[in-house]
Amino acid sequence: MGAVTDDRAIVVRGLRKAYGGTPVVTDVDLSVVRGEIFALLGPNGAGKTTTVEILEGFRRRDAGEVRVLGVDPARADRAWRSRIGIVLQGTGEFDELTVAEVVGQFARFYPRSRDPAEVIERVGLADKARSRTHSLSGGQKRRLDVALGIVGRPELLFLDEPTTGFDPRARRDFWDLIRGLKADGTTILLTTHYLEEAEALADRVGVIVSGRLVAVAPPAQLGDRAGRPATVTWIGPDGRTRSQTTTTPTRLVAKLAADSVDGEVPGLTVTRPTLEDIYLSMIGEREVPV
Amino acid sequence: MTGLALGWRQGVLELKQFLRTRESFVFTLLFPVLLLVIFGAVFSFEIAPGIRFTQYFIAGMLAAGLLAVGFQNLAIQIPIERDRGVLKRLRGTPMPPWVYFAGKVVMVLGAAVLITAVLLSFGVLLYDLRVPDAAGWLNLAWVTALGLTACTLLGIAFSSVARSGRSAPAVVTPVSLVLQFISGVFFVYTSLPAWMQQVAAVFPLKWMAQGMRSVFLPASYAVEEPAGSWELGRVALVLAAWCVAGLVLCLLTFRWTTRRDG
């Protein structure tokens, strides 16, 4: 497996991990192409963080083959660490140090680091640069974590539930930041349980349930979303709302239009399952018409 | 940036953090001075002709100060940093692990210089502490260096004992307090029951306090010590042995992540 020629940043085959005999990750195969944003989606306890922390070199695997930037993370060395950026789950607390002090020191650890002031600006903490980190809000602490993850100019960035605790505005700003990193050529592996986040950012989504990767696809094609039956709803001549689920919605709408007096169908809607419907059906919490 | 410069910058940050944290400032720097003032006022009796307990006590407090900045400080602070994810975040960077420890050493050294200077000033100005001669300064230097090294290494090793940052003070403070009671800091060592002396003699603080007394008490007091002399050779030997033991324990037990992190 050539580290230089391979266009895949992450390759995982047959990954397994158990804690005390309980399997947490079972036979996961995964590959992430350089330059893409890949989102791992799944409920809490599905094995997202365990998988990611194995890829980050924090946890040992029980079985399987793992290559991250061409290197086995179980044998992580400093050269490899300088090429990846990590935003762990949960917030780090740096207490009495200021934002600028912490980001500045982390920048010194990397050979090709970004300018700390620029990074602080980029995550939207410029006016907090001289504040002690304990005085930051939850969302601001999380942005500091992101700053520490990207200050080393990583080729590959891990983001483990990065926007937990963000308000909608902060989340949109964060998405812009991530798109900017992608534009710079950064490969990103993101875990999230926000569907709209996966949909907004990811080139491909992998759904992980009970330690198994059950689907991998671009968000729009996940679970054959485009091919699922559509539900057509309209108001009938008797004034009652009618609804029909069909694989040929266009034909149904054409017939309804033809049958109506003036060619208009009152109250007409055509809906396909949303990504959320598909996702919830995959994790077994909602029925979706097939 | 070269490794050494990196370690130094880490140390500067650690020192800033230490000085900005109210708890460490109060417990490490203010508390010993308060004890000195209270004990100095209450126990002003003579323990031998011309030697007052306060002189004996200041020598012990100098040793206890090193225990506070080395052992107590690190054994409490590191589990808190581990809990707060600081260690795991550092581990995920290309920082060489020794840089983290170099930072701690710089902080401990800075704090040790501070506490020693404060106690010495108070001692000399208020309690007639003898200013050491050249040989005394030399002994003070090596007893401090060896004692502080042992305490620092043991503090790092002991940081793996507490299950969480929150429980760390409850695990660490009693150890250091009991050691101070039985090692000849709060009481004259030879006035303690024999079994207590034997327990204390296993640990470094007793030997650090004895080394400090050799610097600050008149030579005539040496006959009052358990062996009838200052036993400086044995002080050096025991402290060096604890340095080795501490280093081995650090290498065997140090963890960058919490237990639940696997």
Image (cartoon, grey):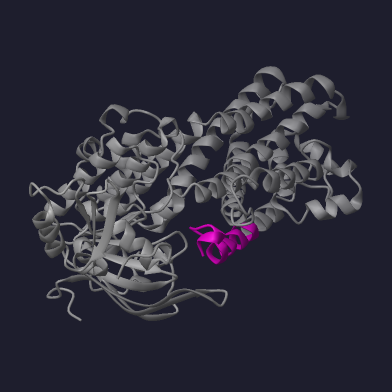
- Which of the pair B259/A276 is nearer the observer? A276
Left or right of A97? Residue B84 is: right
Q: Position of residue B26 (x, y in %)?
A: 61, 28
- Which of the pair A163/A83 is nearer the observer? A163
**Placement of A160 over or under A57, stated as above or below:** above
Left or right of B224? Residue A252 is: left
**Placement of A200 over or under A285, stated as above or below:** above
**Placement of A106 over or under B50, stated as above or below:** below
Left or right of A154? Residue B24 is: right
Q: Is residue B254 magenta?
A: yes
Query: Magenta region's main secondary structure?
Result: helix
Residue at (34, 52) in percent of width and height: A194
Left or right of A8? Residue B105 is: right
Q: Within the image, what quadrant is residue A44 found in?
A: bottom left
Residue at (46, 36) in percent of width and height: A95
State which region is magenta: B241-262
Q: Within the image, what quadrant is residue A37 found in?
A: bottom left
**In this rendering, does residue A273 appear at all?**
no
